Amino acid sequence: MNAIRQPVVSTSNVAKSFGGFTAVGGVSLDIYDSEAVAIIGPNGAGKSTFFDLLTGRKIPDSGEVRLFGEPVTDLPPWQRVRRGLGRSFQISSVFRNATVLENVQIGLMLARGRAWNMFGRASAMLRQEAGAALEQVGLQAKRDMLAGDLSYGDQRTLELAVALSTKPRVLLLDEPTAGMGREESRKCLELIRAIAASERIPIVFVEHDMDVVFSFATRVVVLAAGKVLIDAEPQAVRSDSRVKEAYFGEDI
């Protein structure tokens, strides 16, 4: 008898409103091992709010979020990280005046719910774990540089290292190539693809760049007006007339 496949992340009818505006209007979604799931939609579709509900930056008004079968609906981001969720954000959030290595150490401390003191014992902690994460993304040689001196693409790669340092079982990425040039974007995607494949980490990502979406995703979820319009393989989404209408008749 085959075992029932359990989603790594699932939402059940999650909803979030701000004043009289419904940003997410009841979204149910299951994410499984080895998937790369893109969340797309026109402006105002609810993508960013839904992502925040997954990461814990916002709490839904109703519905439930589960991580590996356990309810995490009311848990803050750091507690979700401790349960295996890795995340990065649309805007680079590195500490510019800290070194590359210190950024990863800070991320590790915060993910474990501990205060960071750059001048105390914490500064000497977790160096091995932080160094291993930098090695994984190819930034080991720049570990002693100030993060603010890195190129934008390397800052985004550093943010990925911070997410990976916590040994996530699922990775949530908010516009991972935002602000990058074509070559930086290509290298970033190749890196994420290689790491996800080697570690068998499922990925959920919000993205505006349709070239990125259709070259990387194994599944695409389109939101429109806070609800799921279609959830299917990339080619089926690309040819769906409802999707073209949601994007005001544009080809995607």
Image: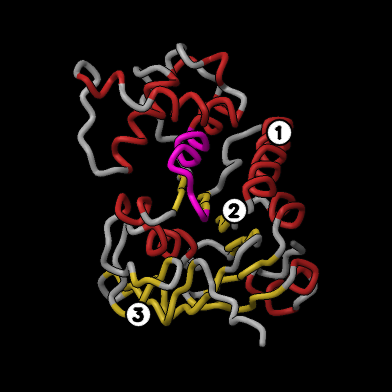
The magenta span reads 159-170
Q: Is residue 53 left or right of residue 156?
A: left
- In this picture, residue 152 sits left or right of residue 162: right
**Rendered location of residue 157, percent (x, y):** 56, 32
Residue 201: image tag: 2
Q: Quadrant of the rendered structure where residue 104 is?
A: top left
Q: Of the numbered discs in the image, which one, if any, rests on residue 126?
A: none
First of labels 3, 2 by sequence position:
3
Mark 3 vs mark 2, foreground winner is 2
Mark 1 touches mark 2? (CB < 8 Å) = no
Label 1 or label 3, whichever comes before in sequence order: 3
Query: Residue 63, which numbered label?
Result: 3
Which residue sits at x=52%, y=28%? 132
Q: Is residue 168 magenta?
A: yes
Distance between the alpha carbons at the discs numbered 1 and 3: 38 Å
The kind of residue tagged 2 is Ile
The quarter of the picture where residue 38 lies is bottom right
Q: How would you rate the neighbour count of disc 1 (Cα within 10 Å): few for under 14, some for 14-19, many for 20 or more?
A: some
Does dot 3 land on a helix, a strand or a loop? strand
Q: Is residue 198 left or right of residue 57?
A: right
- The image shows residue 101, relative to residue 206, as above or below, that is above
- Residue on which the image places disc 1: 187
Name the amino acid, label 1. Answer: Lys
Position of the N terminus by quadrant: bottom right
Rendered location of residue 216, percent (x, y): 72, 53
Q: For this rendering, which residue is in front, 182 or 169?
A: 169
Taking the spot 42% from the left edge, 82% from the top edge, the residue there is 13
Circle 1 — which element? helix
* Element type where label 2 sits in the image: loop
Q: Are marks 1 and 3 in contact (CB under 8 Å)?
A: no
Location of residue 218 with respect to 113 vertically, above or below: below
